[in-house]
Amino acid sequence: MTTIELPKAYDFKSTEERIYQWWEQHGYFQPVNDPNKPGFNPSLKPYVISIPPPNITGELHLGSALFVSLEDLMIRYHRMKGVPTLWVPGSDHASIATHLQIEKALRREGTSREQIGRDEFLKRAWLWKEKYGGIITSQIRRLGASCDWNRERFTLDAGLSRAVREAFIRLYEKGLIYRGPRLINWSPGLKTAVSDLEVEYSEEPGKLYYFKYMLADSVDDNIPVATTRPETILGDTAVAVHPEDERYQKYIGRKVIVPILGRVIPVIADAYVDREFGTGALKITPGHDPNDYQIGQKHGLEIISVLDTNAQVNDKGGPYQGQDRFECRKNLWEDMRIAGLVLKEEDYVLNIPRSQRGGEIIEPMISNQWFLHMESLTKPALVAVRSGRIHIVPEHFNKVYYNWLENIQDWCISRQLWWGHRIPVWYCKECKELTVTRTDPTTCTHCGSTNIEQDPDVLDTWFSSALWPFSTLGWPDKTPDYKYFYPTTMMETGYDILFFWVARMIMFGLEFTGNIPFSQIYLHGIIRDEHGRKMSKSYDNVIDPLIVMDKMGTDALRFSLLVGSTAGKDMNVSTKQVEPSRNFVNKVWNAGRFIITSLDKIEEPPISELEWTLADSWIWARVQELVRDVERLFHSHQYGEAGRQIYDFFWSEFADWYLEVAKLQLMEGADRAYYTATTLVRVLDLCLRLLHPFIPYITEEIWGYLRKSVLNSPLSEIAANWTDGLIISSWPDPRQEEGWEKECITDFSLIQDTIRAIRNIRSEKNVKPGKLIPAILTAGEKTEIFNQQKKVIAALAQLDPERVEISESLPPKQENHVSIALGSVELYLPLEELVVISEERERLSRALVDAKSQADRLEKLLASSFAERAPADIVQKEKDKLISYRITVENLEKQLKALD
Ligand SMILES: [Zn+2]
């Protein structure tokens, strides 16, 4: 027999990279049932996840570490269940984010995108992508992600670009895409339109400015109006009042004069006006406010844009032309004060719209943009979730989803950027018609002129992301991958992009493929710091997952994130929280190492018939219970809870108890050692399989050693069917209970309680570790069990085995003994070896008071309506507890008497 040497400590640094390469080289990340390969069986249902494509500008943060860990867990679990699994990786071109990076680099060189031109700019962007775009994917690999890298995609690659073009054209031909001047969110910093979702609102101190709108037909009369943005006065095209407002009724239909500019505008009536707000009269600027825009549309008001794309006043702004919007605000207000039009200023908290990317204040502006008509797309998307075809975890996000889709606005899909999918529309300079075709045209399809020019804008990044689940599989072609792997199974992502991405994928999936893109959605929460604050550079509280992995290993990080997270809930994380996971990983290593090493001592197959000890049966019953629990929890997507249960079992039952008992059993040698080793191997094997989706590296490493050692030992039959790698081994099958388990678990718990009690007394009384003490036990109907477990109890509680007496009932008065009552079992330890009597009396009295109050409490509870309302088994549990406390009280009283 060859001895297999495991290093004493687990070296994650050298292990992780080696194991990842080994997995990848053996093709374990590829689906076992591949439609492009011989032997393909189309009737096997696959499990498919498309990765939420990280931005190529991105670097791994804890949020990405969480989603990668979760998805890898789902994939590994299904792979082990024998389901053909596919996890499609890829990355997103991230239009705005990348664009900003390139512009920043150009600024550093003293140039700009306008100076170098579009072609050169795009060349730069592609070079940037080649250089930095792989960083994020290499970091995802490091997390252990078992994606099929042969199928990696990029949102701007040729296939996906074709998919985007096809999607645009189909929508255009259906009349769902239109171009027009609309009020949009303008980012003056980025010089592009941004969607409503890319605007973040923050409460900031500001002012409410009160001023007079002078009547055109009466020099003495005015309507008081308030605004938070005086510069927009330049674009006012009406003043609105509530039709039933008695103060202002006389003005309806008359005219007022725009301050400084002198334009004359109407006073209109609209029930939208809030009479309680400000002065109750509202200035209307359809060109720079979304609500005013609505009112303007309703009343057919003129729309005046007073700002240019830099947010500077244009030629409609009279004397303020060329001024920045905030400079104009100051100057105009000053001029109005001089003109006697100012009433007052009040401090006011504003809800300021800021650009999610650039941070500057968003300006609502009228702009010619491309829009996607959403209403017809939302209906099937609503039905898909309402009917249960798509299931969202956690369920309460259904409401959020419905609410958004029911109130959806048309989607502004054009962006004034260069990096992205260019809008496939060509304008003819001769006939002014549009050419929209699948391949780039050289002539106008209407008049044949070659004088055509492509729209300079690109599509919103989320347009291509919305096609992701099927474009990555080959759509619009009906490729073997598309036919087999679509619709995908699970969409796992953060709840914060439910609208940006998830809802749009559902709409596009239904529109283009006629099918839902996935049947399940799992939404994870946001990771916050230990105080619940968002992680941000400005708080200096960002935890870099790469540093955590360097210090404590990938498995420790994964385990912390997976066990700490619950669907839909935010989680607080600190580096300190990863330490227990690191300790756990080490615990697994040490336990594995002990078991593998102990196989060396097993020399021959057994002679006698199989006979399990109580501890063997107990740990087997418990591990089977664990397998059932984990299966149930995985089914309900409670991955964190499943991880906690495996952790608890492994640490506090398997390692702390069974391994200790097993050491004694192994020392007996011969058949006992053989059977003990069998149990050790089987339980460790099951634990490694259950833990693999959580901590893939260390489990694979130990399992490899275990497999080799078992095959080299007399126990080789156990591992006869084991696969080459744990990654492709089978998931433990939950087994039905056979009937013997409960009693066995109860009996072993009693032995554990007894040992714990003795250990507690020893530590309370400061008994020297290693000092063997005598004990008397009366165990009633459990006497036989206790007799069998005498050696175990003695060894684990440090009793002198020669001086342990076990009897069915209490021998006459045990004087000078410290006593412990454990339900029907009583334990006596001689005081002379432990303590002074007065302290013992005190201790027993305290225990008696406690047991009595517990018994009283339960009596009251059982006399109350609880006994009728609660389920019978719960009531029975409380009754059992009461009986147990009553026995304890009785025993304690006896023991106190014995001290007299
Ligand atoms: Zn033409």
Image: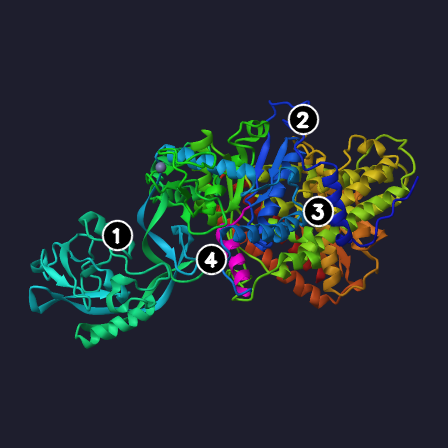
As rendered, which of 204 and 92 lies closer to the eye? Answer: 92
Residue 853 among magenta residues: no
Q: Which residues are magenta?
A: 92-108
Residue at which label 1 appears: 293
**Distance CA(mark 2)–CA(mark 3):** 41 Å
Amino acid beneath label 4: Glu
Work out whether mark 3 precedes mark 4 in sequence or the reverse, and give the earlier one: 4
Residue at which label 2 appears: 37
Q: Nearer the viewer, mark 3 or mark 4?
A: 4
Q: Nearer the viewer, mark 2 or mark 4?
A: 4
Q: Is residue 29 above or below residue 766?
A: above
As rendered, which of 163 and 308 lies closer to the eye? Answer: 308
Q: Which mark is residue 114?
A: 4
Which quadrant does ligand 1 occupy?
top left
Q: Residue at x 74, y 67 (%)?
A: 836
Look at the image and tell me in which quarter the C terminus lies. Answer: bottom right
Amino acid beneath label 1: Tyr
